[in-house]
Image (cartoon, rainbow, N blue to C red):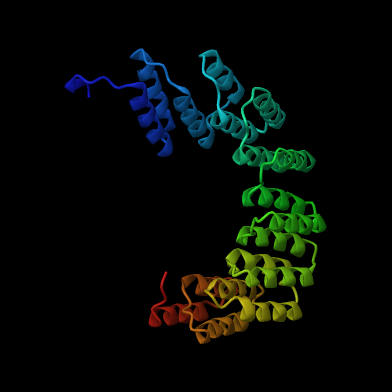
Amino acid sequence: MHSLGVLPSTVTYSTLINGLCKQGAVRNALLLLDCMASKGLEPDIVTYNTLVDGLCKKGLLENPGKLFQYIIYKGHKPDVVTYTAVIDALCKNEEIEKAEELLNDMISRGVQPNVVTYNTLMDGLCKMNKLENAMNWLDEMVLKGMSPDIVTYNIVMNALCKEGETDKVEELLDDMISRGVQPNAVTYNILLVGFCKMKKLEDAKKCLRQMVSKDISPDVVTWNIFIDAFCTTDDVMDILINLVLNYGAQDNSAYISLVKAYAKRGNIDEAMHVLKRLKQEGLKPDIDAYSPIHEMLIEMGRVDDAKDLIAQMNEKKVDD
């Protein structure tokens, strides 16, 4: 540009800084900011927002509050993007009280938080085991006429499940649906973790049925939740098999989870039977299905059987 007699503008530098930050090259973006200043160009609020977000995502923003004050000192008015990025940085630095103070400051200055702002703070609060504070912000959010989204509900429900508050989670689920927010696979997996943690197998099965009734397919996370919680006795394993047969034939994930469960218990024959069942369902076992069996055979000292299994995989041209 210089060779053509065209000088880069603030917008040009901001665009380049944004591109570098998106690529994770935040240090290069900071160098470009210095270059920008040397040319007598003043970054605008968009430039600072980009840098704050990029620094936060790379974990390089050691003093978010100081940078925020610097932005104000330079004569810029922070907007919702600025506040949200700095709140995110404060939460990641576990400066949760300062994050709450900044949200209050934001509101007092007439800058309206959006759902991302609230979600960011509530997620930080929940990770710091400040569930009550998070619930208070959820209430305030609703009182201000703002609709929580699926991310909001998942954040709070996950925290409630960790506390064993499954009844409150179900109430929140009903509230969520009544507001027109439809649960997703993450929501149901959160619920399943809660029920399984409390050993409420019937509630977990009911949750799974509800999940499937809404055309949400259980994934590998779903099955691992069940198996980690209940794979201890033969009768529970039978229940898991029935669940897989009823709800898990869409892909390999359910069967792979069962294979891992059986292999972990040393039940190689049962694990192989699951692979056979997988093929009967018209699904092709991949390397993820065979690997747990191979690993367990090696651990059990059955080296020849492990070699035979590799030969079978090669013969059947098992894909990665």
Q: Look at 62% across and 81% down and name the residue there.
A: 245
Using the image, determine if residue 234 lies above or below residue 151: below
Q: On the rendered image, what quadrant is the N terminus found in? A: top left
The spot of residue 258 in percent (x, y) is: 62, 75
Q: Look at 53% across and 19% down and name the residue there.
A: 71
Can residue 221 be seen in this snapshot?
A: yes
Question: Seen in the image, is 14 located left or right of residue 186?
Answer: left
Q: Closest to the observer: 302 or 207? A: 207
- The quadrant in which residue 176 appears is bottom right
- The quadrant in which residue 196 appears is bottom right
- The quadrant in which residue 315 appears is bottom left
Question: Seen in the image, is 120 located left or right of residue 174?
Answer: left
The furthest residue to the front? 145
The spot of residue 306 in percent (x, y) is: 50, 77
The spot of residue 52 in percent (x, y) is: 51, 29
Using the image, determine if residue 77 lies above or below residue 21: above
Q: Closest to the observer: 116 or 229? A: 116
Q: Look at 66% across and 58% down and name the residue there.
A: 187
